[in-house]
């Protein structure tokens, strides 16, 4: 490979790099380079106002937050300057405010909340296995959400449950037999 590289370098040194040969779609040589279609698209960028550019770079959530903030400012402008102790709106705001060190805060945050967009979101919800129904076990433990549905046990759990259900069945049969004469 080193020899090939040296041979190619010697040819470039002897003849020079040469001019670029332009060809059309059929492979024939063309005197002028074809116009670059990509450049024209870049030049013809639509001129947008600053407000339109700002709108393009903000998402739906940011727009909703901005609208809610503007709504709060309008309400604040219309309200009186002095607030009394029985101000209902201020009381609602204080009720729904989460405070540091509040022992009930985790229960408030884990329940479903209404977001600004009106969608119900459940905070801190645990993931749950949603595959086919697993076999029952002694303790009623549900499988983890990553379980692939394959039982890799040695059958001990099945034998324990079978024995438990058979004993229950025997007791039930004995009770029916003893109470059948009455």
Image (tube, rainbow, N blue to C red):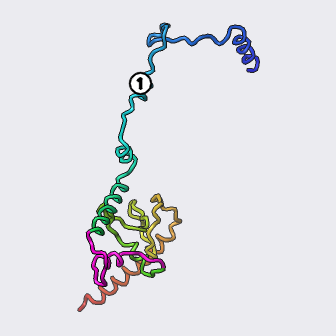
Provide residue 10's location: percent of width, then percent of height: 74, 12
Provide residue 176's location: percent of width, then percent of height: 29, 85
Q: Nearer the viewer, residue 124 or 92?
A: 92
Q: Main secondary structure of the magenta part?
A: loop
Provide residue 18's location: percent of width, then percent of height: 62, 10
Q: Residue at x 45, y 63 (%)?
A: 145
In this view, which residue lies farthest toward the left?
182
Q: Is residue 72 above or below residue 170?
A: above
Q: Residue at x 36, y 34 (%)?
A: 46
Q: Quadrant of residue 68?
A: bottom left
Q: Is residue 113 left or right of residue 153?
A: left
Other residues around mark 1 within 10 Å, as few (<14) / some (14–19) / many (≥20): few
Quarter the C terminus occupies: bottom left
Q: Nearer the viewer, residue 76 or 30?
A: 76
Q: Residue at x 44, y 13 (%)?
A: 25
Q: Nearer the viewer, residue 178 or 58?
A: 58
In this view, which residue lies farthest toward the front?
81
Q: Is residue 58 magenta?
A: no
Magenta-tinted stretch: 78-100
Q: Quadrant of residue 17?
A: top right
Q: Is residue 89 magenta?
A: yes
Q: Quadrant of residue 113?
A: bottom left
Q: Which residue is mark 1?
A: 40
- Figure disc tally: 1
In this view, which residue lies farthest toward the bottom?
182
Provide residue 90's location: percent of width, then percent of height: 32, 77
Q: Nearer the viewer, residue 66 or 2?
A: 66
Q: Residue at x 48, y 7 (%)?
A: 28
Q: Is residue 124 above or below residue 1?
A: below
The kind of secondary structure element at disc 1 is helix
Quarter the N terminus occupies: top right
């Amino acid at each position: 490979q080193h020899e090939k590289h040296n041979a190619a370098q010697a040819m470039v040194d002897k003849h020079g790099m040469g001019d670029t040969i332009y060809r059309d779609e059929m492979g024939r040589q063309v005197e002028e380079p074809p116009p670059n279609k990509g450049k024209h698209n870049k030049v013809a960028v639509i001129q947008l106002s600053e407000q339109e550019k700002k709108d393009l770079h903000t998402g739906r959530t940011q727009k909703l937050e901005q609208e809610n903030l503007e709504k709060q400012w309008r309400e604040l402008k219309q309200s009186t300057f002095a607030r009394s102790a029985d101000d209902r709106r201020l009381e609602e705001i204080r009720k729904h405010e989460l405070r540091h060190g509040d022992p009930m805060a985790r229960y408030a945050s884990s329940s479903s909340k209404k977001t600004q967009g009106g969608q119900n979101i459940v905070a801190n919800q645990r993931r749950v296995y949603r595959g086919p129904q697993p076999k029952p076990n002694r303790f009623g433990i549900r499988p983890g959400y990553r379980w692939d549905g394959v039982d890799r046990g040695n059958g001990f759990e099945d034998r324990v449950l079978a024995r438990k259900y058979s004993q229950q069945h025997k007791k039930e049969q004995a009770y029916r037999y003893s109470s059948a004469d009455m």
